[in-house]
Image (spheres, helix red, strand yellow):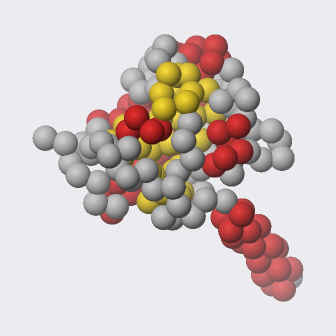
Amino acid sequence: MRGWLTIGLAVILGGSLLAQENGLQVGDMAPDFTLQASDGKTYQLADFRGKQAVVLAWFPKAYTKGCTIECKSLAEKGHLIRKYDVTYFMASVDPLEDNTGFAKEQKADFPLLSDPTKDTAKAYGVLNDRGVASRWTFYVDKEGRIAAVDTEVNPATSAEDMAAKLGELGVPATE
């Protein structure tokens, strides 16, 4: 029994490592994007380069259990993240209308980006075989490089985990 458990764990971990090997690595330039958001604005990653760090938290689908938990975490405890000089987003391949309604329902005080063409999700390597984004969070430094990638996101502690990671990465605090 232990042998099968070890083999199963190796397959799972190997798959995770393979996904990271084929995707973006720490130090790579983050792929630029121009995406519409739930707040009615359009955001382009290049606009932040040289000015501010960015956190891009990909999520699978609006109105689903885990995504609702994650969005609530960021909405209720976003003050922990805003202690740092950073702009943060949740992003999915959902249509803009879905993310706008979802953001309103969850009282999100931060933008949810929509990537209905799935081009940005593909560029970040998060588009999975179900056609939705994997729940991965990308930390982009002020220069536009990937500073960290979290592929083991816990939706319930997303805000606390983001704040802790921003501190670890040395993102400056706001005043």
Q: How many marks?
A: 0
Instruction: From the viewer's side, name the closer residue of 4 and 53.
Output: 53
Q: Looking at the image, which residue sits at the far left?
A: 175
- For residue 98, which quarter of the picture? top right
- For residue 116, which quarter of the picture? top right
Residue pictured at 60% horizontal, 21% vertical: 99
Instruction: From the viewer's side, name the closer residue of 105 and 98.
Output: 98
Q: Residue 50, how many percent across, how many down?
A: 32, 46
Quadrant where the image shows the C terminus = top left
Residue pictured at 48% horizontal, 28% vertical: 43
Instruction: From the viewer's side, name the closer residue of 57 and 68.
Output: 57
Residue pictured at 68% horizontal, 20% vertical: 95
* Residue 96 appears in the picture as rendered: yes
Q: Residue 129, how many percent across, how many down?
A: 83, 47
Q: Residue 77, how many percent across, how many down?
A: 36, 36
Q: Residue 1, how many percent across, how many down?
A: 86, 82
Vertical placement of 111 versus 120: above or below? above
